[in-house]
Amino acid sequence: MRAKMWIFDCANTSKRLFPTWRQLFWCYYAAVVCLLSSPVRTDDACPFSCICDRDSGTVTCREGEDTEIPEDIPVWTSSLIITGRNVSTLERGAFTANGTELEMTMLSLSYNGIQVIEPYAFLGLPRLHLLDLSHNRLMSVSDRAFHGVPELRSLYLNNSILTPAVADLSGALGTQSLRSLHRLELAGNRLSSLPLARLDIYNLHVLVLVNNSIESIGRENVTNIYQQKRLRVYLSLNPFRCSCGLESFYYWLKNSSQCPDAGHLLCSEPEAKKGTPVEQLQGEDLDCLNENLEAVSYVFLGIVLALIGVVFLMVLYLNRGGIKRWLNNIREACRDQMEVYHYRYEQDSDPRLANVAV
């Protein structure tokens, strides 16, 4: 405030015809103080430890010790690349520190160890077309994490979703703010099912689910995918369980061209079909009716054998008296026969008969 008063006095002094040297000294001093206390930021300023190329509109911030997003991002930035840092949390309005919206169209935040994405983290980027969050360690993703990016067309979340964040993923991707999304990549996240409850709210053309833990895709999801004629789904390197539950998916795979890597889909179970391409299976291998009939036949066979066993036990019980007499007769017959053998043995062992033989 005092510096401003000095500047005001300087303005009045300059109007005088012959200002003294002391007055001129204090004017210059006030001007220097104002410049130092109020730093001026120009549009050409480049954030610390970053490389800026105004001709291409690219700002690149690589390895460093910073744990936050740079606050002084130039307004002319169209592509921002931040990688190799320790940005554990993307806070609300992380890209609107200056209170102005950026015309940025591409944002890459891969390999930054990001664990949490708070609500409205990308607010202030209304023109954003591509967002890359691959190779992070997301443990929590807010349902409103992607609010404020209505023109987002490509979203990359490869090798980023940890187990605690899997449950959050469906809510975060279900926002109407992603209605323009064309490409969604979720490779290498150990997903066991399709993370999108509905596909009709998107403008998806490419869905990448490679290298996850998907064993089967149910009838409802298959129908949902089939209705989106423009959609292409990549599903290789998933451990498909080639059993009755895969029937709907199998027939969609055979009769549709929506899975470009269909030839690389392999069975992991059962053991007899391990390594077999899903497309090369026969319809009867996945026929739920045959499996049910086979199970029923085994059950029926067990029931028949159990009935036969019960009848046999009943016959034995009802004829227990006759069986007892029969067993006694056999025992007596065996005893008589043994007595005959014993008598003959005694006769053969007589010494007189032995001398006669000599």
Image: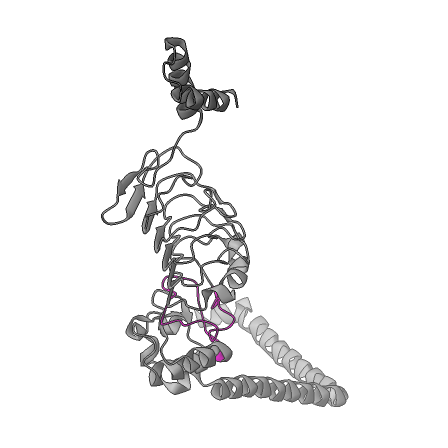
State the residue at coordinates (32%, 80%): 257
State the residue at coordinates (40%, 56%): 157
- Residue 199 in magenta? yes
- Residue 275 placement, left or right of 12: left
- Residue 232 in magenta? no
| Residue placed most toward the observer, 132 or 195 | 132
State the residue at coordinates (61%, 77%): 338
Magenta segment main secondary structure: loop
Q: Position of residue 25 (x, y in %)?
A: 38, 12
Q: Is residue 104 above or below residue 341?
A: above
Q: Position of residue 177 (x, y in %)?
A: 48, 64
Q: Position of residue 49 (x, y in %)?
A: 32, 34
Q: Is residue 241 above or below residue 61?
A: below
Q: Quadrant of the C terminus?
A: bottom left
State the residue at coordinates (48%, 78%): 245
Residue 260 is at least partly visible in this image: yes
Look at the image and give the residue range highlighted in magenta.
192-219
Residue 269 is at least partly visible in this image: no
| Residue placed most toward the observer, 168 or 56 | 56
Q: Position of residue 281 (x, y in %)?
A: 35, 81
| Residue placed most toward the observer, 35 or 278 | 35
- Identify the image quadrant of residue 128: bottom left
Say how many tags the image has: 0
